[in-house]
Image (cartoon, grey):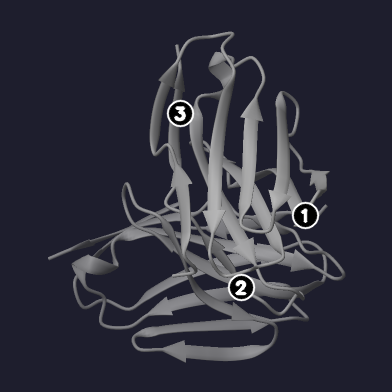
């Protein structure tokens, strides 16, 4: 357990509204990731961060933005939610170096109606 | 981009059976991860390996770098092993993982 929390854990929102999901870690890990998990797909990377204010896009970044102003917090924002963004979102962290494991948060179930 | 394939997609077995889940990938990697996800639950890392074999309790993970293939074995399976098992690979010089779609394992008492 790498001390990763996500908030909220569940959210229902309407199409067109902005939504922000928060990931908080206590392990001082350098790398943080946002994934979405959908039936029939593996976990897919949305955005990741390799340090404070350093972020990059993943394979499914359209419609999402991120920010990391502190080591411990990584925010995922849906500027205008769409029904295709209904999913389970997982945050993960990793220490520096490719030999480190990734640790996952508990997930946020988001429903866009 | 690395392509990760897992087989089987679904597996149902009786308690006590020996279980094997397979993972193959298309491009050489620096490490391979096996993860476990219980229904409605979070994702837990089981193994990270770059060569050979690792064992933890009843779980054994092996990797063949030349054949680009890994297996996860469960000995003396138990209903609490019922979960989705996910394979993920890390390319060289990359801090990102590519995931398989998972194998859903159900162990019947």
Element at label 2: loop
Query: How many circles with numbers are drawn on the protein?
Result: 3
The correct choice, above or below, for A50 with respect to A39 in the image is below
The correct choice, above or below, for B22 with respect to A113 in the image is below
Element at label 3: strand
Which of the two marks, 1 or 3, is nearer to us in this view?
1
Element at label 1: loop
- Within 10 Å of disc 2 (Cα), the crowding (few <14, some 14-19, many 20+) is many
Q: What residue do we see at 45% from left, 39% from top?
A: A108
Mark 2 vs 3, N-terminal side = 2
Q: What residue do we see at 74% from left, 33% from top?
A: A61
Mark pair 1, 3: CA separation: 26 Å
Q: Chain of mark 3?
A: A
Tell whether A12 sits left or right of A48: left
Can residue B99 be seen in this snapshot? yes
Which part of the image, by quadrant, shows the C terminus of chain B?
Answer: bottom left
Mark 1 vs 2, N-terminal side = 1
Q: Residue furthest left?
A: B109
Task: In the rendered structure, find residue A101 and report the number of the disc placed on it.
Answer: 2
Residue at the spot of label 1:
A52
- Within 10 Å of disc 3 (Cα), the crowding (few <14, some 14-19, many 20+) is many
Q: Position of residue B20 (x, y in %)?
A: 43, 73
Task: In the rendered structure, find residue A110 and report the number of the disc placed on it.
Answer: 3
Q: Position of residue A84 (x, y in %)?
A: 58, 19
Q: Chain of mark 1?
A: A
Tell whether A55 sits left or right of A107: right
Q: Are marks 1 and 2 on the same chain?
A: yes
Mark 1 vs 3, N-terminal side = 1
Marks 1/2 in contact by CB < 8 Å: the verdict is: no
Can residue B14 be seen in this snapshot? no
């Amino acid at each position: 357990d790498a001390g990763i929390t996500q908030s909220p854990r569940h959210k229902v929102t309407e199409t067109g509204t902005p939504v922000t999901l928060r990931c908080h870690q206590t392990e001082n890990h350098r790398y943080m990731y946002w994934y979405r998990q959908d039936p029939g797909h593996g976990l897919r990377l949305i955005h990741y961060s390799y340090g404070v204010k350093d972020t990059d896009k993943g394979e499914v970044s359209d419609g999402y933005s991120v920010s990391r102003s502190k080591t411990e917090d990584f925010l995922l924002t849906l500027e205008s939610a769409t029904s295709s963004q209904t999913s389970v979102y997982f945050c993960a962290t990793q220490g520096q170096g490719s030999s480190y494991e990734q640790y996952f948060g508990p997930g946020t179930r988001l429903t866009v109606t | 981009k690395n392509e990760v394939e897992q087989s089987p997609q679904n597996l149902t077995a009786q308690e006590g059976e020996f279980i094997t889940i397979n993972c193959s990938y298309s491009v050489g990697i620096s490490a391979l991860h096996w993860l476990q996800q219980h229904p409605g639950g979070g994702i837990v890392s089981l193994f990270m390996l770059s060569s050979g074999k690792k064992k933890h309790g009843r779980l054994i993970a092996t990797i063949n770098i030349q054949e680009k293939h890994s297996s996860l074995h469960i000995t003396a399976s138990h209903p609490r092993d019922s979960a989705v098992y996910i394979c993920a690979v890390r390319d060289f010089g990359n801090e990102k993982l590519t995931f398989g779609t998972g194998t859903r394992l159900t162990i019947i008492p």
